[in-house]
Amino acid sequence: LEVTPALRSYVTTKLDRIMRHFDQVVDVKVLLTVEKQKEKERRQRAECNIHVKGSDMFAESSHQDLYAAVDELVDKLDRQVVRHKDRVQDHHHEAPKRLM
């Protein structure tokens, strides 16, 4: 699949949303493919690996429209990143004080 400048810009803009939620992203790899054997409804496929400090995240999405697949992919990744951020922040709270 040849990535057009418009598609590259679209993916970059969408992934900026993830960076806005969590600034400890180390590496992002996106793979966009068109599968020939699959039914036409789900031919366009988007996959993404995100390496953040302390964890790796993966999401994939298939759709008949590549832009819709990217939207769905970013939504999945955004939920994962927010969940990871909450987990990391929960570990840094003070221990609860005991009531006597």
Image: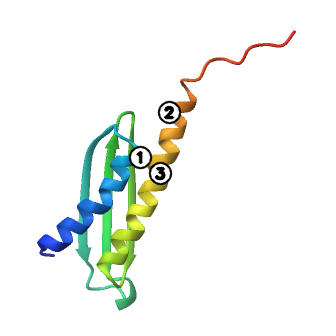
Disc 3 target residue: 80
Task: Give the amino acid type for the residue marked by disc 1 in the picture.
Answer: His
- How far, Cα to Cα, is label 1 from label 3? 11 Å
First in sequence: mark 2 or mark 3? 3
Task: Give the amino acid type for the residue marked by disc 3 in the picture.
Answer: Gln
Whether residue 2 is visible to the viewer of this picture, yes or no, is yes
Task: Give the amino acid type for the residue marked by disc 2 in the picture.
Answer: Val
Disc 2 target residue: 88
State the residue lying farthest toward the top: 100
State the residue lying farthest toward the bottom: 40
User: Which element type, helix, strand or loop, lies under badge 2?
Assistant: helix
Residue located 40% across and 59% down the image: 59
Residue located 20% across and 72% down the image: 7
- How far, Cα to Cα, is label 2 from label 3? 12 Å
In the rendered image, the quadrant that contains the N terminus is bottom left
Residue 11: x and y in percent read: 26, 65
Residue 82: x and y in percent read: 49, 47
Q: Residues within 10 Å of mark 3 (few under 14, many from 20)?
A: some
Q: Quadrant of residue 77?
A: bottom left
Residue 50, disc: none
Residue 72: x and y in percent read: 42, 69
In the rendered image, the quadrant that contains the C terminus is top right
Disc 1 target residue: 21
